[in-house]
Amino acid sequence: AQSVAQPEDQVNVAEGNPLTVKCTYSVSGNPYLFWYVQYPNRGLQFLLKYITGDNLVKGSYGFEAEFNKSQTSFHLKKPSALVSDSALYFCAVRDPLGSNYQLIWGAGTKLIIKP
Amino acid sequence: DTEVTQTPKHLVMGMTNKKSLKCEQHMGHRAMYWYKQKAKKPPELMFVYSYEKLSINESVPSRFSPECPNSSLLNLHLHALQPEDSALYLCASSQGQSGQPQHFGDGTRLSIL
């Protein structure tokens, strides 16, 4: 079955430290991978995507993600966390054998950045 | 600022009421979506319109009725909802091609009394 896993419900990081939010996937074929962020009382905002090419993808707000095909992972990273990065983060994958419109979502990871 | 606009931001309705949620985008996107999101959970796809035609209905109860009047507008008509329908309803749009991200509005927070 196609699936996306975010193994951590919550990640706590001190401001200024590097952060990593983990995502692993299980889909057939080559996946299209996405990260979204949701701030309180807001909709989801697109951060970055991996379709093909360079395994290190850069996105909005200083975030980047590394695609690792052998480990089927797409972890989100930032070198220096800000308190304003505190939010709910979702990883999603489009099944390349499925519809263009349907995403498989991870359960979400709450990121808390402490001053 | 979000490029997908949803109204109203909040809605409280009784189980016998009829109301509508509205969504508008001016990015020229050809696909529009309705999602339901419970607190701290990922969004659940409800409907997808592609080129103004209903493309996907994820077995949503008939008390939810989508409508796409034109390529920029998407409505969700609500009737005889149940308390478990209380949630954040998100609209999204995308270019429709494979690999293009979806852009979300800030949602309508719906409470059913």
Image (cartoon, coloured by chain):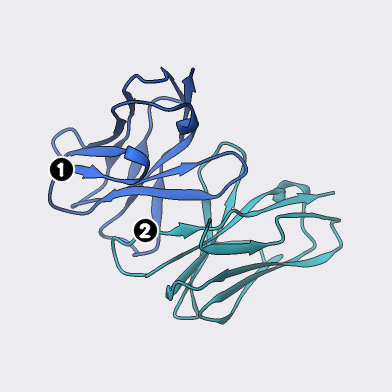
Q: Chain of mark 2?
A: B
Q: Chain of mark 1?
A: A
Q: Nearer the viewer, residue B20 or B104?
A: B104
Q: What is the spatial separation of the Cα atoms under label 1 and label 2, in whole angstroms? A: 18 Å
**Residue B44 pos. (x, y %):** 53, 51
Q: Nearer the viewer, residue B106 or B68?
A: B106
Say which chain is cyan: B
Q: Which residue is mark 2?
A: B101
- The answer to whether residue A62 is left or right of residue B84 is left
Label 2 is placed on what type of residue? Answer: Pro
**Residue B5 pos. (x, y %):** 59, 64
Please tell me whether mark 2 sits on a helix, a strand or a loop.
loop
Image-quadrant location for residue A77 = top left
- Residue B54 vs B37, above or below: the answer is below
Q: Which residue is mark 1?
A: A55
Report the residue at 36% width, 58% height from top: B101
Label 1 is placed on what type of residue? Answer: Asn
What is the quadrant of the N terminus of chain A in the image? top left
Q: Chain A is shown in which shade?
A: blue
Q: Nearer the viewer, residue B5 or B77?
A: B5
Report the residue at 45% width, 59% height from top: B103
Q: Is residue A33 visible?
A: no
**Residue B16 pos. (x, y %):** 87, 62
